[in-house]
């Protein structure tokens, strides 16, 4: 009910529009602070002997120190019920991997000024602040987004290249990335240096200046030696609704896994995001 009321307020707003919201790589953000919460009910036999639940919380901050440059910080946490705790089998609340990143965007306009387009180069460093083995359960429930956030005791370096095209009604974007990961301990084998590849395709319809409907496809190709990697290709679709009211921003999304290994764990993940733009 609260979420419905919040979206109703957004629909009635007449403030300056916010950028479309994506759970994957974003497009040209403003200065903002936001909190994202996602819940993934897990299946019997997926991560444990019975049904379970994984709740993730991610505090994000994005800052524009100068034109076309952004820096960002992410601080994730997770809660896993005892049947979703892959290491201990006990209910667990702990930290994920804090990330620090940034990027530069080159922006252009078509001669008619009807479309803006651009490219950006960005990257994130994930620090090994997820110290509990049960964190891998959170990475497996939504791997296209959370693999680097919740891999236990793992450094990660993830550069990205992004291209986008936008006008008053539509936004289209795509990106490709590479992820190097260094594990302190690999629970599946002895390999500690891993190489992954990720990508995203996304589109938004600007229903009104302050409300967007979004759809994205995210994929991750894991290293063959990645922990618990039954299938290397992880991919999912995420429809969402996002908007803003003055400086307040909000979004609601559903992530549906497409690969069989992730569907063996969960059929869907629900999420909301709210924050303040300045």
Image (tube, rainbow, N blue to C red):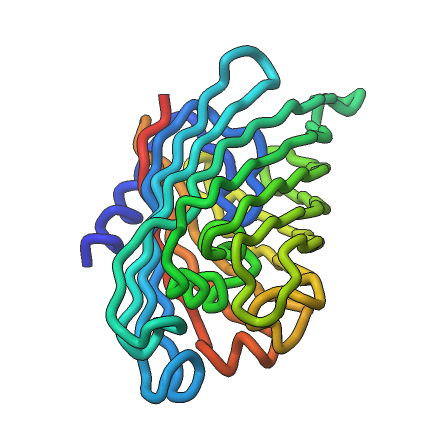
Q: Relative to residue 115, is residue 187 depicted above or below?
A: below
Residue 7 x %, y %: 30, 48
Name the residue nearer the viewer: 43 or 21. Answer: 43
Outermost residue, front direction? 190
Name the residue nearer the viewer: 4 or 134. Answer: 134
Q: Relative to residue 223, is residue 228 depicted above or below?
A: below
Outermost residue, right direction? 111
Outermost residue, left direction? 1
Count of number-bearing discs: 0
Give the residue at x 51% y 41%: 126
Q: Quadrant of the N terminus?
A: bottom left
Residue 43 x %, y %: 39, 83
Say left or right for 235 vs 54.
right
Q: Quadrant of the C terminus?
A: top left
Give the residue at x 55% y 48%: 24
Residue 81 x %, y %: 27, 72
């Amino acid at each position: 009910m609260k979420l419905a009321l919040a979206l109703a307020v957004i629909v009635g707003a007449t403030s300056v529009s916010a950028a479309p919201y994506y759970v994957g790589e974003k497009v040209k953000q403003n200065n903002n602070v936001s909190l994202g919460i996602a819940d993934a009910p897990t299946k019997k036999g997926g991560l444990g002997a019975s049904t379970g639940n994984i709740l993730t919380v991610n505090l994000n901050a994005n800052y524009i120190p100068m034109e076309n440059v952004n820096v960002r910080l992410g601080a994730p946490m997770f809660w896993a019920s005892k049947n979703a705790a892959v290491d201990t089998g006990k209910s667990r609340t702990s930290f994920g991997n804090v990330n620090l990143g940034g990027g530069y965007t080159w922006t252009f306009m078509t001669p008619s000024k009807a479309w803006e387009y651009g490219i950006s180069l960005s990257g994130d460093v994930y620090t090994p602040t997820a110290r509990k083995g049960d964190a891998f359960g959170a990475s497996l429930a939504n791997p296209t987004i959370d693999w680097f956030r919740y891999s236990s005791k793992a450094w990660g370096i993830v550069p990205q290249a992004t291209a986008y095209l936008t006008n008053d009604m539509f936004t289209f974007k795509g990106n490709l990335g590479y992820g190097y990961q260094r594990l302190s301990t690999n629970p599946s084998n002895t390999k500690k240096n891993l190489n992954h590849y990720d990508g995203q395709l996304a589109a938004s319809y600007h229903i009104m200046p302050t409300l967007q409907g979004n759809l994205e496809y995210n994929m991750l190709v894991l290293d063959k030696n990645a922990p618990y990697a039954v299938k290397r290709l992880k991919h999912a679709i995420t429809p969402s609704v996002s908007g803003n009211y003055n400086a307040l921003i909000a979004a609601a999304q559903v992530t549906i896994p497409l690969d069989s290994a992730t569907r063996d764990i969960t059929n869907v993940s629900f999420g909301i995001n709210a924050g303040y733009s300045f």
